Image: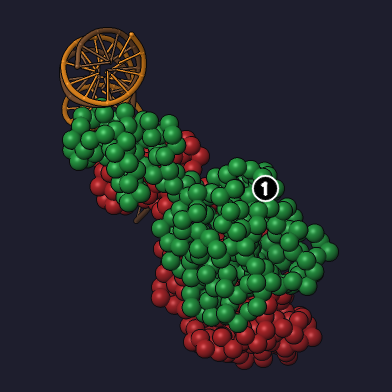
Chain colours: A red, B green, C orange, D brown
Amino acid sequence: MLKKERQAYIIQQINIHNKVLSSDLCVQLDVSEDTVRRDLQELAEEGKLMKVHGGALAKSFHFTIESKQVYSLPEKKIIAHKAIDLIKDGMLVVISGGTTMRELVNMLPPDLNATFVTTNVPIALELLEHPNAEVIFLGNKLLKSAQMAVGAEVVQRLGQIKADLCLLGTNSIDLHLGITDLEWEIIEVKKAMIACAQKTVSLAISEKLNSSQRLQVCPLEAVNILITELAPTDQRLLPYAKRGLSIL
Amino acid sequence: MLKKERQAYIIQQINIHNKVLSSDLCVQLDVSEDTVRRDLQELAEEGKLMKVHGGALAKSFHFTIESKQVYSLPEKKIIAHKAIDLIKDGMLVVISGGTTMRELVNMLPPDLNATFVTTNVPIALELLEHPNAEVIFLGNKLLKSAQMAVGAEVVQRLGQIKADLCLLGTNSIDLHLGITDLEWEIIEVKKAMIACAQKTVSLAISEKLNSSQRLQVCPLEAVNILITELAPTDQRLLPYAKRGLSIL
DNA sequence: CAAGTTCCCGCATAATCACGCAAATATTTT
DNA sequence: AAAATATTTGCGTGATTATGCGGGAACTTG
């Protein structure tokens, strides 16, 4: 096999998977690791990839990683961390949008092998960076304000899914109305998300507690788990625990 | 055996296998390696192949080795600008992915009132920034390498659409196979895009001209308009014009 | 911090290449 | 047709390139 061929193969792999491992390549290409490393180095010098310990990454991959880290409130990280523990290999997870959710996707362990269903464009993009996640985007008309797909199509297709988990970014939650939101079209989708999942998890910063908007997504009883940045024993969470929610 | 014969044979082998080894050729042609090397050098000077250490590669091979462009080239801006003129108020436009297309979306005039259909996540995100564009994302399983939705669902839903324009980011186009691409799933979607639109526009940097990949998206005749960064009168575009494509 | 990878460096080997020259072949001129 | 000229080819030689291997440094991970 010619050197250029090898290098073309490497680039191809990079374009598909966003990364390559030297150890994989030297088996696939049937050459020594040194040769692979030399190839990677050359390609790196030509600016076609980014060499890292153990292999190489697509250049674009690195950029998106660097350009993240902008919207990271420490509270959101805590919440995201708690929620990630709920996701196990093989699960089908429906997730909504929001910056907390983006943080969560960002922090997903790379070896996690789960399938994610979403209607939110930035979330989908973030999920695509994950090496092992399978991503399903339920599309239709996109709502600009929420950067997500909405409408009957989406609701209908959600109805055809049986998910293990529904992770809901939550704008407002209180004891009377449960989860509420602003726009009719968003509510319809969130309702469908909750309906199709076995367990519903609400992710909310503590400041969103005890606030409400006009339209109800679901009553408090429809939520199984509530995650905030607070300790589960915090005073403010007590009323929610009494209503039967698990607090994390 | 005559020199011309030998060289014709070499070209033939290149066309079949996309590569030749000097060592193979000197056995097959029963000449010394020097002769083979001299032939390859000549053919390389004529631009008919690409000489590398140990043999030669098809010219088209050169393109598969190019990695994703991260920054937008000025050529892409020229192309985007030409394409934008084709989009009028009230149109339904199907658009594929790629950096050129992203450039295009970015440059859309803010007062344009059109509807866009896409299956590409970054494009959708970009379109959402536009104040007046209506965006429809056809979703399903997402393909990581292309950051786009693929599969039967998408193809089927494209079939239900009647679009005015299909803007195709083009990886490879040549006179023989028309538009070609790398992955099967991408081709299926692009085919459906072309089928549902009244006019198909191919956007391609001139370096993509006369290159081909393994899988055919559509024959040249299915393309109505070809846009490159070159002047429409450029020599390199003449053969395409003769085949009935409008050149912009 | 300790084990296991991965990396880097220099060297040995083998393949490939470039160059000059002379023999063979083709082309042109006389 | 013979001679002169030009082109092509093969081979020898030495330079260049590609690759694998060993050993020690550097990094990763638990």
Q: Position of residue A223 (x, y in %)?
A: 60, 86
Mark 1, residues whose alpha carbon is within 10 Å: few (<14), some, or many (≥20)? some
Q: Residue at x 34, y 33 (%)?
A: B40
Q: Position of residue A227 (x, y in %)?
A: 60, 75
Quarter where residue A156 is shown: bottom right
Q: Is residue A66 left or right of residue B53?
A: right
Q: Position of residue B227 (x, y in %)?
A: 64, 53
Whether residue A19 is visible, yes or no, is no
Q: Residue at x 73, y 61 (%)?
A: B86
Quarter where residue B139 is shown: bottom right
Which quarter of the figure is the N terminus of chain B placed in?
A: top left
Whether residue B227 is visible, yes or no, is yes
**Farthest residue in the right direction?**
B111
Q: Tally the numbered discs.
A: 1
Quarter where residue A155 is shown: bottom right
For the residue pair B163 and B219, the one nearer the viewer reads as B219
Q: Residue at x 25, y 47 (%)?
A: A30
Q: Position of residue B171 (x, y in %)?
A: 52, 54
Q: Secondary structure at mark 1?
A: loop
* Kind of residue indicated by mark 1: Pro
Considering only vertical position in the picture, is C20 above or below A230? Answer: above
Query: Circle 1 sits on which residue?
Result: B232
Q: Residue at x 50, y 63 (%)?
A: B219
For the residue pair A148 and A141, the one nearer the viewer reads as A141
Could you tell me which chain the residue with mark 1 belongs to? B
Considering only vertical position in the picture, is B188 above or below B38? Answer: below
